[in-house]
Image (spheres, rainbow, N blue to C red):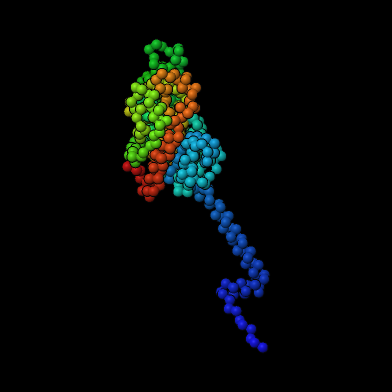
Amino acid sequence: MSARKKTKLCPASQWIAQISRRPLRFLALLLAIFFLASASKADDLSHELPTPDHPLKVKVVILTTFEIGGDTGDTPGEFQYWVERRKMDTIIPLANAFHDVRTDGTGVIAIITGMATANAASSVMALGTDPRFDLSRAYWIVAGIAGINPSRGSLGSAVWADCVVDGDVAYEIDGREIPGSWSTGVIPWERTKPYEEPRPKDMQQLYLLNPALVDWAVRDTQDIVLDDTPGMKKMRDGYTGFSRAQEPPKIVKGATLSTSRFWEGAMMSKWAEDWVRYWSAGASQYYTTACEDSGIMRALTNLSNAKKIDLNRVLVLRTASDYDQPPPGETPAQSLATKDSPEHLGGFLPSLEAAFRVGNKVVSEIVDHWEKYSLELPK
């Protein structure tokens, strides 16, 4: 009778063979491995999203103000390009704000504040007081579209704000009932006539941004090529007598006026110029108008007072989707009636592109050099 040939087992097979001879011990081992794996998986899941005990150390906060439809895959608003192009796939619920937070995993987060000052202020406060976010060294960038003063710039231009002026807090008399010598019925708070000095101090209506940081942002993005289209050129050509409105888009610096009213017309634009000049004491000029920035700046100022953020790390970028007044020969009422027509929306998508392209240059620069910029401001 021939001898049976022995089969040499590999080390793993020998281990399994030995364990299999002890079924109770084997079962106990399998259960231990299962529970360890489950606990490890649960632990991993608990750290996927920030918690008060493990807050996200934020490098940059991107504040947009509206979206059209979903966050991805349809007609874009201010938020969509950021979500899609920076791959901000992780959603962090923020129930007490207008919209949840998204992050790309690099320390950059973004949110939609909602339109107008009330939504914007409450959303920023909700984010800024949430213990899941460490915002102590975060940079803040408002990246939104705006109307532009045709005396200062053209469609698709990107304007870094040197200051934000609140245009809502005021007394107002209907323009049909004001004295003949007045240029406007909007009167500063606790004053009796337009632009009366001294300027009121009991309500903050001028928010000055860190001039060194703003100048750095302008320099850092100055060479970015902004989109220019035949539709934009056609719209520009209608603004005869406005040389800057007829130029291709540029990157510039100037004031943004914040009101919750979507106003329109040359006379309102003149009021905006005078209002900014009054509140800035002539130090700045009115370039863009939007609806959220004074609410955002009020919330950020309060958060800075509470030592939760650094107000010196705030930037406001507004890109021109349209002009704040119709071209010569068209009335404000006519312009308002056709505001959503293709002829008036020629600057919309280019302004969204400019907001992302210009804003993302600054975001990437900060993130790529975080070891430096976490400790000291760009110069």
**Percent from the top left, x then y, of residue 369?**
37, 48
- Give the tally of numbered discs: 0
**Percent from the top left, x then y, of residue 146?**
43, 30
Which residue does the image show at 52% across and 46% down from the upper left? 90
Q: Is residue 50 left or right of residue 142?
A: right
Extreme residue toward the front, this view = 230
**Is residue 205 among the parts visible in the rendering?**
no
Q: Is residue 375 above or below residue 263?
A: below
Quarter occupied by residue 361? top left
Q: Nearer the viewer, residue 244 or 190?
A: 244
Which residue does the image show at 38% across and 21% down from the upper left? 270
Q: Nearer the viewer, residue 202 or 17?
A: 17
**Percent from the top left, x then y, of residue 375?**
37, 47
Q: Nearer the viewer, residue 221 or 280?
A: 221
Q: Nearer the viewer, residue 300 or 271?
A: 271
The C terminus: image quadrant: top left
The N terminus: image quadrant: bottom right
Extreme residue toward the top, this view = 180
Q: Is residue 12 above or below residue 269?
A: below
Q: Is residue 225 left or right of residue 299?
A: left
Which residue does the image show at 56% across and 74% down from the upper left? 11
Which residue does the image show at 33% across and 26% down from the upper left? 243
**Percent from the top left, x then y, of residue 256?**
40, 30
Q: Is residue 49 above or below residue 267?
A: below
**Is residue 363 among the parts visible in the rendering?**
yes
